[in-house]
Amino acid sequence: MDKLKVAVLGATGLVGQAFISMLSKHPWFEVEAVAASPAKAGVKYGEAVSWHLEEPIPPEVSGQTLKEPVPEKLSKDIDLVFSALPSNAASEVEPLFARAGYIVVSNASPFRMDPDVPLIVPEVNPDHLRLLGEQRRRRGWRGALVKNPNCSTAILVLTLKPLMDSFGLKRAVVTTLQALSGAGYRGVPGMAILDNVLPYIPGEEEKLMYEPRKILGTLEGGWVKHAEIPVSATTTRVPTLHGHLESVHVELGEDTDTRSLVEALENFGGLPQKLGLPTAPPAPVIVRHGEDRPQPRLDRDAGGGMSVVVGRVQHASLLGDAWFRYLVLGHNLVRGAAGNAILIAELMVRLGQKH
Ligand code: NAP
């Protein structure tokens, strides 16, 4: 098939660069337009970007001129818009694109918890894309807005879903050790993070508490009934570059053994694997058995950054018979951002929901 033309908003940022890199090798999509902040409109991408990836800037994008991030500046034959905008810009700009008829798949937090906005991890809740019918009816948009969850949430729910399906899930307690790139290119000053751990990331704990409930919820009467799973979250920033590590305790609905739990995680797969989507990793959850895994440097690129890596699965019987604990690690820019969004877009194309 002819490649579909896509635009990337926020293309010069860290998530934007991950989009450009992944899309340059994509079998279905090609980057037709790039936009950054309005001040950079008119500048060539290769001159405007502080490129942080080891591979060179893809030549077919390097020479493209940055557009203003408004729908009037995009050509009408763009099939999909990926957004890596900061929150304040996203809340203004994304509805303009959706109203103008574009499908927007976004990483930014505004609208994530709106009842008519699908918040998707494709292996976990692909059926929530059905909210788009209601979204169009309510908002009168010709296009649509679909959201990626917060990066730590996307990584966490890939492990909670198989546990919930196999054993039931009563509650979860999670502490994150989040990498620097999760805060964006200008996010955390070196003086604040070198030789240090920051014990608070504004807004992050609330996202981890509430987003999993929506993603793990069920469609009932056309709406998502949120899962009644309390999640207690502590989020910290640590001086790693990429890859969020999360220490997780879960209370399951029934007692089991660690072997069954590992099996449930290892056997997990979803619609993207069944459909053989190009960005779907063969195993969304990989379990490492060495006691010193997962580690950000060694494990963040598993499955091209699309798999999450679990280790140190143990019975936490001091807390109760049905309590278990484990560590999970995922690449925040790939599974936590650009890769998950591209997988959502692939799913929409395959399910015929592109228009
Ligand atoms: P970033 O590195 O700060 O990049 C921000 C991008 O937005 C840049 O391209 C910037 O362009 C552009 N921009 C800034 N102000 C703008 C405006 N007023 N209008 C239009 N564009 C504007 O941030 P990031 O880490 O890539 O994150 C992007 C989004 O994804 C955020 O909403 C973030 O919360 C979310 N997210 C990030 C991660 C992660 O791991 N980093 C994971 C999940 C979700 P200039 O170059 O011109 O400044």
Image (cartoon, helix red, strand yellow):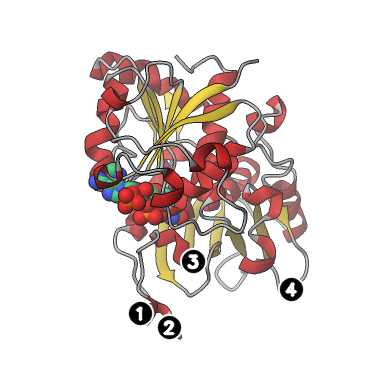
Q: Is residue 222 visible?
A: no
Query: Residue 170: which disc?
Result: none
Where's residue 199, x and y in %? 37, 75
Quadrant where the C terminus is found in the figure: top left
Quadrant where the N terminus is found in the figure: top right
Work out how far the residue at label 3 is from the one at label 2, CA to CA, in angstroms. 12 Å
Q: Amino acid at mark 1?
A: Ala
Query: Residue 291: which disc?
Result: 4
At mark 2, the secondary structure is: loop
Work out how far the residue at label 3 is from the one at label 4, CA to CA, in angstroms. 21 Å
At mark 3, the secondary structure is: loop
Work out how far the residue at label 4 is from the one at label 2, CA to CA, in angstroms. 25 Å
Instruction: State if disc 2 and disc 1 touch (CB < 8 Å).
Output: yes
Q: Amino acid at mark 2?
A: Asn
Where's residue 347, x and y in %? 57, 26
CB at mark 3 closer than 8 A to ligand 1? yes
- Crowding near the residue tagged with mark 2, few <14, some 14–19, many ≥20 C-alpha atoms within 10 Å: few
Q: Nearer the viewer, mark 4 or mark 2?
A: 2
Query: Residue 192: which disc?
Result: 1
Q: Say which residue appears at 50% left-offset and 23% top-offset.
A: 5
Mark 2, residue position:
196
Where's residue 140, x and y in %? 25, 15
Pick whichever, 314 or 78, lies toward us.
Answer: 78
CB at mark 4 closer than 8 A to ligand 1? no
Mark 3, residue position:
179
At mark 4, the secondary structure is: loop
